[in-house]
Amino acid sequence: MLSLTGLSVAIQAVEILRGVSMHVPAGSMCGLIGRNGAGKTTLMRAVMGLLPARHGSLAFGQRDLLRTPAHARAALGIGYMPEDRRLIPDLSVEENLCMPAWANSVPDLVARAQRVYEAIPELREFTSRRASQLSGGQQKLVALGRALMSGTNLLLLDEPFEGVAPALCQRLIEVVENLKRQGLTVLLSESDLQHSARLLDQVFRIDRGVVNAA
């Protein structure tokens, strides 16, 4: 599903990812585990086309992602949930959820929204509320729902459980676990395996921009 081979990424003159090679099989849930600053977010941003690669290859199925513009990667069915959520505070929850679909002019907006609400039913309770009115945990749920709007084939979840109250953290784990049961391919990052150990089919350890399979 997702293959990185010898991928190197630098921010300004500093090399962050150094020859990363890893493979995320279709239908699997894989963990990218490493301390803060190890390169987890850089790897996900590189997959989404938000950071350019210096060397190596990056493939999604048979598609060469390095030759695919960033805006076209979401259209391939790749969804991304940033660690800091990146919701638009003055837009409603529903507007935040629909933003990726509007940006890519998807024809099945209603069906995708229905899929999100089935996966995370509590989002229906505050569709009209502004994102700025939600708690941090609620915003994480919205960010996950927004990623699902695009992520029909692959989800990239960057620290999805970080900084969330225990009750909402458990709810996020339940949602992600259900996505796994549905066969969605997921790559999620964490600083350790505290929350995700039982969810993962494979673990990749990242340290100083180098990835090794656990």
Image (cartoon, grey):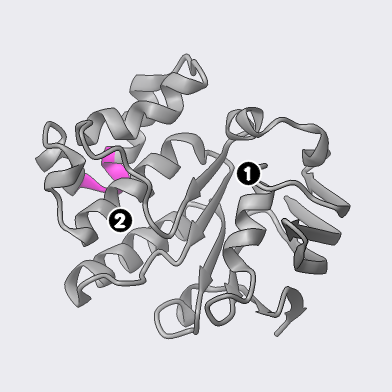
Image height of 153 relative to 165, above or below: above
Rendered residue at 33%/21% (across/down): 110
Going by the picture, which residue comes out furthest to the front? 13
Rendered residue at 31%/63% (across/down): 172
Q: Quadrant of residue 117?
A: top left
Residue 95 belongs to magenta span: no
Magenta-colored span: 117-121
Rendered residue at 49%/15% (across/down): 105
For residue 140, the mark is: 2
Q: Quadrant of residue 178?
A: bottom left
Pick whichever, 37 or 159, lies toward us.
Answer: 37
Q: Earlier in the sequence, mark 2 or mark 1?
A: 1
Q: Using residue 193 as the reference point, say whether residue 212 is left or right of it.
A: right
x%, y% of residue 62? 83, 39
**Quadrant location, the C terminus:** bottom right
- Mark 1 neighbour class, 10 Å CA radius: few under 14, some 14 to 19, many 20 or more: some
Give the tally of numbered discs.
2
